[in-house]
Image (spheres, rainbow, N blue to C red):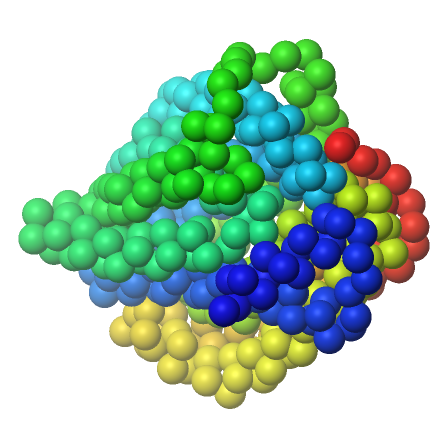
């Protein structure tokens, strides 16, 4: 029933029919709930990974923590590559130009897979040196290098996973990606246990388990996209997989600023790792575990952001800017309420959240301290997440990239350089809390205006 209702409401968006506020809220929820469940499964997977490794010891946990920001930057490139084509697909579907959407999708897959192979080779080349570049202690360098190398070897798999799910989401199908992510979580638990404990591979086993789970489950998503998806089923027609100049140019218009943003944002995270690393193994482990614990708070934000990207993209493609803005603000309000409630719960249950991840009392105590600081950022963090997702659906990526540069490098890193030497890890998290609030205010006013909806690729 909900699937039929969702399809009916999406058809109204594409057909130019009026949607009342109640219907808009219903559509946001129908798309947002599966995406939130997918985010939840990913976070549970991260918790399990961190908990399994954490119980091996703080040294093993720190070996993953030191390269975590570097894995994010490589994964971020994969996401940016995918968005360059999935945003086009969403807008073309919004204008009911399904054959053209399929053509863009084909060319997109060839392009992003080629790029991911180059990324994997680059990552493998730097893996032996990366931990030392980040200031890691010698005791964790070997495990950290091995973990990062295995992660990079699976980058083409990750790229196919991200792209297949983002293409499905562009059609408004959040159910299949959610099912796939939940299945990946279940398999990740099994494979991690097998590789970490049964085979005794430790940190390497965590990377292998996640990569294997991603490969197996997302083959189903790829099959569904190509063979069953009503809008993008490639069996309906034939066409070239080789990208043409127009599709690449449009993709670069979207992805180019996102690549820069990825370098800016992830580069700032790497800089943060460099700032935190001198504080010692306990601080590195506490920082890594606290980031994992906090992810439960921003789970609804990122799930609803995927819904906002799809709904805004289809609304822009249907030439309905007013509706696109309404979807953006409805989603923003929903995410803010949910993340505020979760922030309060995180403040209260911070000791229990850290205790699940590690039994090191020093790490738990420090993690609790910083989580309670971060609880005061969750409301406006939600605004920034949805604001960015809405802008992405409209193909507006350049200005948000500039906003994120100022927010991360001027506010967060600037404050962290001052506060961390004085207050330790708590100083860095105070800087992060202030920056997330500033970012939320900036994105609120961006979405409130009209200039972010000027582009249309359909």
Q: Is residue 452 above or below residue 370?
A: above
Q: Position of residue 369 (x, y in %)?
A: 52, 77
In the displayed image of the protein, which residue is found farthest to the bottom? 348
Image quadrant in which you'd find residue 102: top right
Please state which of residues 165 and 366 is positioned toward the viewer in this rendering.
165
Image quadrant in which you'd find residue 267: top right
Q: Is residue 143 above or below residue 237?
A: below
Q: Is residue 342 above or below residue 48?
A: below
Q: Residue at x 78, y 72 (%)?
A: 21
Image quadrant in which you'd find residue 303: bottom right
Horizontal placement of 360 versus 74: left or right? left
Q: Residue at x 84, y 50 (%)?
A: 320
Q: Position of residue 237 (x, y in %)?
A: 50, 23
Please state which of residues 442 and 335 is positioned toward the viewer in this rendering.
335
Q: Position of residue 261 (x, y in %)?
A: 68, 38
Q: Position of residue 50 (x, y in %)?
A: 33, 60
Horizontal placement of 432 versus 210: left or right? right
- Residue 216 visible in the picture: yes
């Amino acid at each position: 029933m909900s699937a039929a209702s969702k399809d009916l409401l999406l058809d109204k968006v594409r057909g130019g029919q009026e949607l009342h506020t109640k219907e808009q809220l219903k559509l946001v929820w129908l798309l947002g709930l599966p995406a939130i469940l997918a985010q939840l499964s990913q976070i549970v997977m991260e918790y399990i990974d961190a908990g399994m490794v954490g119980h091996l010891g703080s040294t093993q946990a720190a070996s993953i923590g030191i390269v975590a920001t570097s894995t994010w930057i490589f994964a971020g490139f994969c996401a940016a590559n995918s968005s360059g084509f999935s945003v086009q697909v969403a807008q073309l579907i919004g204008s009911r130009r399904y054959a053209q959407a399929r053509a863009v999708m084909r060319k997109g897959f060839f392009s992003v897979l080629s790029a991911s192979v180059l990324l994997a080779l680059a990552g493998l080349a730097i893996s032996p040196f990366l931990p030392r570049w980040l200031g890691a202690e010698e005791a964790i360098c070997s495990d950290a290098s091995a973990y990062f190398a295995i992660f990079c070897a699976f980058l083409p798999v990750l790229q196919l996973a991200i792209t297949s799910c983002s293409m499905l989401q562009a059609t408004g199908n959040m159910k299949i990606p959610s099912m796939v992510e939940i299945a990946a979580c279940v398999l990740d638990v099994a494979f991690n246990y097998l590789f970490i404990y049964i085979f005794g591979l430790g940190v390497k086993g965590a990377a292998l388990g996640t990569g294997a789970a991603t490969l197996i489950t997302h083959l189903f998503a790829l099959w569904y996209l190509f063979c069953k998806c009503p809008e993008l089923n490639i069996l309906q027609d034939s066409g070239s997989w080789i990208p043409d100049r127009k599709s690449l140019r449009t993709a670069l218009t979207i992805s180019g600023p996102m690549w820069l943003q990825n370098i800016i944002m992830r580069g700032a995270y790497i800089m943060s790792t460099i700032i935190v690393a001198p504080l010692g193994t306990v601080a590195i482990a506490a920082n890594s575990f606290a980031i994992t614990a906090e992810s439960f708070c921003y789970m609804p934000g990122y799930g609803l952001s995927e819904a906002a990207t799809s709904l805004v993209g289809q609304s822009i493609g249907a030439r309905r800017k007013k509706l696109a803005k309404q979807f953006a603000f409805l989603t923003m309000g929903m995410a803010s309420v949910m993340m505020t409630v979760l922030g309060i719960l995180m403040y209260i249950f911070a000791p229990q959240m850290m205790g699940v991840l590690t039994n090191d009392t020093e790490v738990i105590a420090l993690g609790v301290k910083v989580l309670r600081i971060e609880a005061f950022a969750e409301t406006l963090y939600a605004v920034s997440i949805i604001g960015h997702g809405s802008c992405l659906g409209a193909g507006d990526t350049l200005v948000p990239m500039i906003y994120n540069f100022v927010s991360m490098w001027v506010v967060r890193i600037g404050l962290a350089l001052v506060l961390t030497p004085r207050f330790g890890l708590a100083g860095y998290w105070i800087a992060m809390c202030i920056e997330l609030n500033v970012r939320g205010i900036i994105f609120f006013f961006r979405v409130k205006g009209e200039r972010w909806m000027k582009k249309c690729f359909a």
